[in-house]
Image: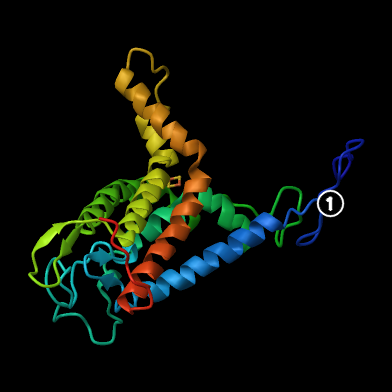
Amino acid sequence: MPESLPQVAGALPSPQGFGVTRRGDPWWVTPTGVLVGLSVFVIYSTWAVFTHHGAEFGNYVSPIHVPVLFGDTPHAWFGPKPAVWPAFLPWAPGVFLFWAPAGLRLTCYYYRGSYYKAFWGSPASCTVGKPWNTYRGENSFPLILQNVHRYFLYIALVWIGLHLYYVGGATRFADPVTGEVSFGLGVGTVVMALNAVLLAGYTLGCHSLRHLAGGFLDRLSGRPLRRCAYECTSWFNLRHMGFAWASLVWVMVTDVYVRLCATGVVTDYRIL
Ligand code: FES
């Protein structure tokens, strides 16, 4: 018995060593872009969650703080910071619920495939050498926890409604003299509305939602509603990566816009 399998004629040997490959194309561009893009988002959003000051401007609320449950702000649903909040813990209105949208992205099938490559390099791309040769997949702790994704999806569907609620609030402007509230549109309203649309597009393309819509059925004929839902989620699913990045960037853009308005650096232009 030979001790190792004979080499198949013409087959390429497995690359040995991290990053070693025979590929001549710029395979490293995508994982590097993901590494930089996600790092920027994680750093920025962490700062933003704990820096509520300036994240609201009149009827505009930054999407990073949605919904505002507690806080010293007129947008807080349940009043000021709870008195029982431990003094040693950092406080911001967003600390209660930021885990919900973060959990959806962290466990997203698309992002998983991307950040495993970008941050762990195991492998960074096809036929590129890995830093280690053990592979346990997602069948053991801690990656088996990624299976909670569908529950984050349920929460995310509620979050779409919350963002639309805040977009509705961004169409209500108070008259500076009389205080009377009436319908209006500002640039901030459009920025927030586009944010809600992109987040909805990202969520509706979720693999778990597509599965729920009809992925487990043998056939969809004779089921017009299921077929419609399945085709709708499939359309978004094909564009999931695009919506994932566009919504990620636009969340930051919206937060920055609201903060610039709040600090007076930018004047919000009223369209209507
Ligand atoms: Fe990306 Fe569900 S697979 S949000």
Q: Is residue 127 left or right of residue 55?
A: right
Q: How is the image coloured?
A: rainbow
Locate residue 204, reporting x and y percent.
38, 41
- Is residue 94 shown above or below 122? below
Q: Quadrant of residue 133?
A: bottom right
Specify the quadrant of the image occupied by residue 182. Answer: bottom left
| Nearest the eye: 226 or 174 | 174
Q: Residue at x 35, y 28 (%)?
A: 229
Which quarter of the image is occupied by the N terminus?
top right
Q: Kindly tell me whether residue 91 is visible in this rendering.
A: yes
Q: Position of residue 259 (x, y in %)?
A: 35, 73
Give the residue drawn at x 27%, y 76%. Answer: 92
Q: Position of residue 106 (x, y in %)?
A: 45, 57
Where residue 253 appears, as percent x and y from the top left, is 43, 64
| As drawn, 246 above or below 49 | above
Question: Mark 1 near ligand 1 (CB under 8 Å)?
Answer: no
Residue, x 30% and y 76% (percent of image)? 262
Q: Amino acid at mark 1?
A: Gly
Please name whichever residue, 151 or 169, is drawn nearer the observer in this view of the structure: 169
Residue 133 appears in the figure: no
**Is 165 situated left or right of 262 in this image?**
left
Residue 33 placement: quadrant: bottom right
Looking at the rendered image, the quarter that the C terminus falls into is: bottom left
Tell me the residue that label 1 is attached to. 24
Q: Residue furthest top?
A: 222
Q: Secondary structure at mark 1?
A: loop
| 139 shown above or below 169 | above
Left or right of 100 on screen, residue 165: left
Could you tell me how many numbered marks the image carries?
1
